[in-house]
Image (tube, helix red, strand yellow):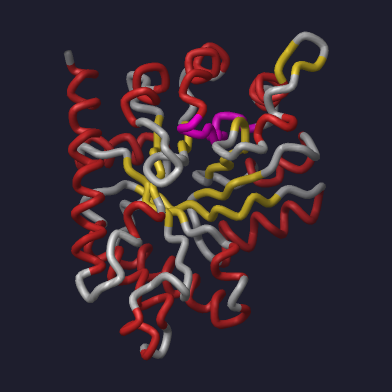
Amino acid sequence: MTTEQLVEQIHKKQSFLCIGLDTDLDKIPEHLLSEEDPIFAFNKAIIDATHHLCVAYKPNIAFYEAYGIKGWEALKKTIDYLNANHPEIFTIADAKRGDIGNTSTRYAKAFFEDMNFDSVTIAPYMGKDSVEPFLAFENKHTILLALTSNQGAFDFQTKTIAGKELYKEVLEVSKTYKNAENLMYVVGATKAEYFEDIRKIIPNHFLLVPGIGAQGGNLQAVCQYGITDTVGLLINSSRGIIYASKNVDFAESAANKAKEIQLEMKVELEKLKA
């Protein structure tokens, strides 16, 4: 999917919501556990109920790896279902990969070719030769971890080294990578006060923003400094939407939560027209 196609969907749906499919068998409704593939049954129900309210889905790969082959099969069925029925949806493999040379190429092939995701999250710590193999794929996007929403982000990401905070160095250096136009960045909603400085460095790239909802991030604060003329934001909510209910009405409850966020996003998009 191209960036232009993603922006078109944002305006069409009046939403820049990304829903995280972090499916945990300990948290899904009990009646689904009798299904042949409870993970896929849960995901399909969530997708069917919410696809018109969001522009992206983000399975966190750990929630599938944890169940071995069955988990991978459920992930493959999920992405195949999305690509077949909702090809307009932007898909994110939240895998946080990152290794050098040919290993990164293999990771990229796994998610971009075999699984047919539109994007994958990447850790930048190993530098240029761990990122560029992902950027070589046409119309695929590499989402680089920049400033994350967890408390441990302060251990390294905000430390000042040679007069510059490390996350800012990641942003600056990554702009020099080959095919850097295919980069997006992870910036946590719980770090909203940093968005103004981030936009000075990367004014036009899309930001994947976790931390809204269960982690306490504020949509309006993020939009105040993070939104661009082409929106430039994908706001992710996972637990707050998909686990809105553990009853038989779980999908309907998820849709209601997604709708609440979508309506807030519509207001922010209307401000761009003013």
Q: Position of residue 83 (x, y in %)?
A: 37, 63
**Residue at horizontal 69 percent and vertical 42 percent from the top:** 123
From the top left corner, tell me how far across and down residue 112 is, in percent: 56, 57
Front position in the image: 200 or 139: 200
Q: Within the image, what quadrant is residue 136 found in?
A: top right
Residue for point 69% across, 28% down = 157
For the residue pair 73 and 65, the one nearer the viewer reads as 65
x 58%, y 59%: residue: 111
- Rendering quarter of residue 12: top left
Whether 129 is drawn above or below 167: the answer is: below
Q: Quadrant of residue 44?
A: bottom left
Q: Is 182 part of what is drawn in magenta?
A: yes
Considering only vertical position in the picture, is 249 above or below 212? below
* Magenta-colored stretch includes residue 2: no
- Placement of the C terminus among the 4 image quadrants: top left
Indicate whether 64 appears above or below 263: below
Residue 22: where, in percent of width, then height?
Answer: 47, 61
Judge whether 230 appears above or below 49 on screen: above
- Which residues are drawn in magenta? 179-190
- Could you tell me which residue is drawn at 67 percent across and 25 percent down? 167
Q: Residue furthest top?
A: 163
Q: Report the number of numbered marks.
A: 0
Which of 262/137 is in front?
Answer: 262
In this image, 170 relative to 99: left or right? left
Residue 231: image location, x then y, percent: 34, 27
